[in-house]
């Protein structure tokens, strides 16, 4: 294949090192070298532009859309319709320069295969299939009417996630792996967008979480934990989960535990942008709206304390709680709540790659890595306008945007 050289630009290599002027050569889907005056078969003029590694979103739901919060509408449309919206969700995501996502439930093995085979254009995915929840927890679709919520319909390749007890949760981990899960997603606290639970209360006993973690480890999988409440966070950390996702009410004891255990925080600050809008939306169930009305933005304060303490952070957004396409807002929120802009971009590149176990392949611009390259016009740290300045996205050495 042709040797392609990006010339005349600046490089943010993903490590946090200062921007440097250099050319970048790629071939056969890999980065060959960085240097000055490189030559190739094809050239990409990057004068006035900056090259970034492909970005990550390590907490997204590509199978769901912001419009899906209207559950009455969902209940009255064909079941398969939401699958066809996935193509647009993937397109919006990769257009931002996000070439890798960790899907936090909803994407199944068929969606992952469709991207891998080039049927759909989008970021590569690690999938969790469905979130594990205790009975009455964040992913239990039970409704007082006796119906099931529209988001909770199992189908071939998407097992029900509700489970209880040491044997029950272990069995459910095996079901998710059988269905294709690369990572196991659990709810160790209640959530905001589910009508029957309290986000401050723990879900699953610590012994149940440990059973999940140990069963997943036997199958070479890590566990990511949806966790808002302080006790749910601490149970999950003590039990050995890989990451705490959200961390809304993270306290100082939880921070110390995360530092001690090396647990990652995925703060999903972007999700808080829509709290007020969702609280005032009559299409959402009243119990959900009630939980959101007085929430405010406690996750910002929790993130500032975690950032100051040195907790490991990777970028995740929880889109579509804020619509797909708004993912880069996470960089801006991190950079105004305790991170430098450089540290925020590291969270979206090399740190995220490490969290997902992909640091040998992705996350930095260096020889031997997969050629995921994002071409940005101007300053890569001007996060408020970054979305509009992403000009080219290359994935595995192929231009996709």
Image: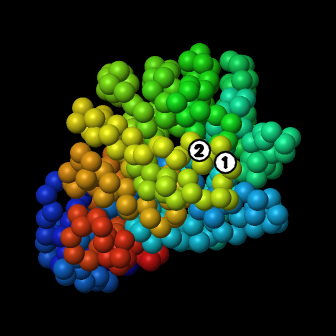
Whether residue 257 is visible to the viewer of this picture, yes or no, is: yes
Q: Is residue 249 above or below residue 35?
A: above
User: Which element carries disc 2, helix, strand or loop?
Assistant: helix
Could you say which quadrant of the image residue 110 lies in? bottom right
Residue 246 at x, y percent in the picture = 46, 41
Badge 1: residue crowd in 10 Å (few <14, some 14–19, many ≥20):
some
Residue drawn at x 69%, y 25% as measured from the top left: 169
Image position of 121 with respect to 16: above or below? below
Q: Quadrant of the C terminus?
A: bottom left
Along the viewing direction, whichever of 306 and 165 lies nearer the viewer = 306
| Inter-mark Cα distance, 2 to 1 | 6 Å
State which quarter of the image contains the N terminus.
Answer: bottom left
In the image, 319 versus 213, the foreground residue is 319
Asked if the residue under mark 1 is in contact with the one under mark 2, i.e. CB atoms within 8 Å, the reply is yes
Residue 272 % position (x, y): 45, 51
Vertical placement of residue 14 versus 354, above or below:
below
Residue at 78% in and 41% down = 143
Residue denoted by label 1: 286
**Towards the viewer: 186 or 249:** 249
Number of disc labels: 2
Q: Is 185 on the left or on the right of 361, as rendered?
A: right
Q: Quadrant of residue 39?
A: bottom left
Residue 364 in sight: no
Residue found at the far right of this picture = 146
Relative to 151, residue 379 above or below: below
Q: Give the label on residue 290, or none.
A: 2
Left or right relative to 156: residue 345: left
Judge from the rendering whether residue 280 lies leftward or rightward of residue 58; answer left or right.
right
Tell me residue 138's x, y (percent): 64, 37
Side of 397 relative to 143 (left or right): left
Residue at x-position 26% and y-position 77%: 377
- Image point (76%, 59%), residue name: 72
């Amino acid at each position: 294949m042709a040797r392609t050289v990006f010339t005349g630009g600046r490089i943010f290599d993903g490590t946090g090192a200062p921007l440097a002027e250099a050319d970048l050569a790629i071939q056969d889907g890999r980065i060959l070298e960085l240097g000055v005056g490189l030559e190739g078969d094809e050239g990409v003029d990057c004068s006035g532009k900056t090259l970034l590694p492909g970005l990550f979103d390590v907490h997204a739901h590509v199978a769901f859309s912001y419009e899906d919060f209207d559950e009455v509408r969902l209940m009255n449309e064909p079941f398969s319709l939401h699958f066809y919206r996935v193509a647009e969700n993937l397109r919006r995501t990769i257009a931002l320069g996000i070439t890798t996502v960790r899907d936090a439930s909803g994407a199944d093995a068929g969606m992952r295969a469709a991207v891998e085979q080039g049927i759909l254009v989008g970021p590569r995915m690690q999938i969790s299939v469905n979130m594990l929840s205790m009975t009455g927890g964040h992913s239990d679709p039970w409704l007082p009417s006796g119906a099931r919520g529209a988001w909770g319909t199992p189908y071939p390749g998407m097992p029900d996630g509700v489970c209880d007890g040491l044997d029950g949760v272990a069995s459910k981990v095996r079901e998710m792996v059988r269905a294709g899960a690369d990572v196991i997603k659990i709810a160790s606290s209640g959530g905001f967008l589910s009508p029957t639970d309290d986000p401050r209360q723990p879900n699953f006993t610590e012994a149940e979480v440990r059973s999940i973690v140990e069963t997943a480890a036997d199958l070479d999988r890590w566990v990511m934990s949806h966790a808002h409440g302080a006790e749910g966070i601490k149970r999950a950390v003590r039990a050995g989960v890989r990451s705490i996702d959200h961390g809304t009410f993270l306290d100082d004891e939880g921070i110390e535990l995360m530092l001690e255990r090396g647990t990652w925080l995925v703060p999903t600050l972007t999700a808080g942008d829509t709290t007020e809008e969702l609280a005032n939306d009559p299409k959402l169930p009243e119990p959900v709206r009630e939980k959101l009305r007085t929430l405010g933005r406690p996750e910002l304060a929790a993130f500032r304390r975690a950032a100051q303490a040195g907790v490991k952070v990777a970028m995740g957004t929880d889109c579509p709680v804020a619509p797909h396409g708004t993912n880069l807002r996470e960089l801006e929120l991190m950079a105004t709540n305790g991170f430098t802009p450089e540290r925020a971009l590291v969270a979206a590149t090399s740190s995220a790659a490490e969290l997902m176990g992909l640091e040998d392949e992705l996350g930095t611009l260096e020889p031997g890595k997969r050629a995921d390259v994002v071409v940005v016009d101007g300053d890569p740290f001007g996060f408020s306008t970054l979305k509009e300045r992403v000009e080219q996205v290359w994935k595995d050495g192929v231009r996709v945007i």
